[in-house]
Image: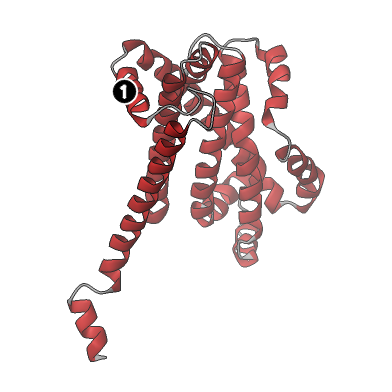
Amino acid sequence: MAETALTRAAGGPSVLRPTRVSLIRAVTLLALLGAWELLARSGWLYEGVVPPLEKVVAACVQLLLTPAMYRHLGVTAWEVAAGFALGFAAGVACGVPMGAGRFFGDAVGPYVDAFATAPKIIFLPIAMLLFGTGIGSKLALGAASAFFPVAINTAAGVRQIDPVLARVGRSFRLSAWQMATRIYFPALRRSLVTSMRLAFGLAVVGVLLAEIKLSSAGLGFLANEYYTRFRVPDLYAVLILVFALAVGANSLMGRLARRF
């Protein structure tokens, strides 16, 4: 007991653990950067495929100083946000009845599970036929990518809700909308936040794939332009920007999850 009290007073495991985790992360990052630089200087790969870090850093700075980049960033941000919102709303609207109703779940669930495993890029030709080659096809692919994890995770969360709550709602003759807003959604808060994090990452992937295949604007288009011109440091700069933005958004959603 005395040892525990002394440990806490001196800043015990609760204080030391975050420091240790931060140290491990910093060492891991430095090791990865060192391995990258060694590989770039070794000559084992074709010249330019893995450029030195100084060229990548210079490309990142140049990218941030280029006004046109922010136009591409705005296009991608709008497409990701809209596609994510559509896919999330549709996933919740489908997942709640899938989990709450046995008949609907048995009828629709197997198809949702089957399509969830398919690469979402196969839906791009269909999206092009339905919405053309403009922004509609990017939104559709982003929404399709976000829909499936939300629907599956929401249905699973509904099935884990205490059946007593559902019976109480039915005994008060609540409508389907009242059951969803007063019974299911409050009990699904954590599950919905987890679904948001999964869906957002997949929406980013879906939109970028669509932009790479057919677009005249967006970060995916910009990355494809640098690739075709073999401007490899600039390509890595765009990828680093996408990665940083995605990690930042996911971190915000993680903080949101901890507040619930």
Residue at the disc numbered 1: 58
In this figure, what is the number of numbered marks? 1
Identity of the residue drawn at 35% across and 46% down: 30
Q: Nearer the viewer, residue 248 or 212?
A: 212
Q: Nearer the viewer, residue 227 or 76?
A: 227
The coloring applied to the image is secondary structure
Identity of the residue drawn at 34% across and 19% down: 63
Q: Quadrant of residue 15?
A: bottom left
Q: Nearer the viewer, residue 145 or 130?
A: 145
- Asked which secondary structure carries label 1, the reply is helix
The amino acid marked with disc number 1 is Ala
Q: Which quarter shows the C terminus?
A: bottom left
The correct choice, above or below, for 135 with respect to 84 in the image is above
Q: Position of residue 221 (x, y in %)?
A: 52, 15
Q: Quadrant of residue 151?
A: top right
The correct choice, above or below, for 222 with respect to 164 in the image is above
| Image-based side of 91 in relation to 13, left or right | right
The correct choice, above or below, for 110 with respect to 52 in the image is below
| Image-based side of 12 in relation to 173, left or right | left
